[in-house]
Image (cartoon, helix red, strand yellow):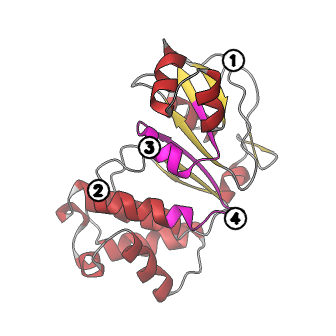
Amino acid sequence: MLRGIDLEIPAGEFCGLVGVNGAGKTTLIKSLLDLCAIDGGRIEIFGTTHKETAARAHLAYLPERFLPPHYTTGRDFMELMRTLHAATYTAPQCEAVLAALDFDPGALAKPVRALSKGMAQKLGLAATLLSGKPLFVLDEPMSGLDPKARALLKQYLLGLRGRQQTLFFSTHLLSDVEALCDRVAILHGGELRFTGRPAECCAQFAAPTLEQAYLRCVE
């Protein structure tokens, strides 16, 4: 259960949502997307209430347990998502994003059911990143990725900084928050314990690292 959540993410900001299992991270993201009901309060996406379908036209979402349709090929899935997102990316742009995720383009010819968890995750990330939306909402985007793919994804995301691209993602990896985020939101027991810059979190909890600051925050 979430209580008293007050969080604003300005356009162009990268914000990482962290917390232990069961803290409410996925519930908060699903609330934002109107995938679960809220008892009170108001959620807006670029000034439009989250209950309006039009609000979600400006974002691309990748769920924590991403399971692409097993009966399609990777290429069919990418074409489907391009249609749903009304995206206009070119073949070279697609190839660049696949390369950034260390995804072999030849694997697009395979049925999705033949892909490993990590490859399926890369497929979902590629479709999300190619959507051209101003807001990416990613629930545990590094899940299943090997170290090389994680490093390449972070490098790609850092390349989006300064382009008015907004990123809101949940993670257990504080190192990713330190590398990517303008702000960190610490969720614990359904409540936001801290929201601010990683350096401010360290200063507030008198800790030399974000990891130690996080531990002191949730104690």
Do residues under tags 2 and 1 come within 8 Å of each other at their CB atoms?
no
Secondary structure under the numbered disc 1 in the rendered image: loop
Is residue 175 positioned above or below 123 on the image?
Answer: above
Q: Quadrant of residue 160?
A: bottom right
> Gap between marks 3 and 1, in whole Å?
27 Å
The residue drawn where x is 67% and y is 58% is: 57
Which amino acid is tagged 2?
Pro
What x and y, as percent, mark residue 31?
60, 33
Per the image, the residue denoted by label 3 is 175
Per the image, the residue denoted by label 4 is 162
Which amino acid is tagged 1?
Gly
What x and y, as percent, mark residue 54?
72, 54
Q: Which residues are magenta?
A: 156-185
> Gap between marks 1 and 4, in whole Å?
31 Å
Whichever of labels 4 and 2 marks the residue nearer the N terminus, that label is 2
Per the image, the residue denoted by label 1 is 4
Secondary structure under the numbered disc 3 in the rendered image: helix
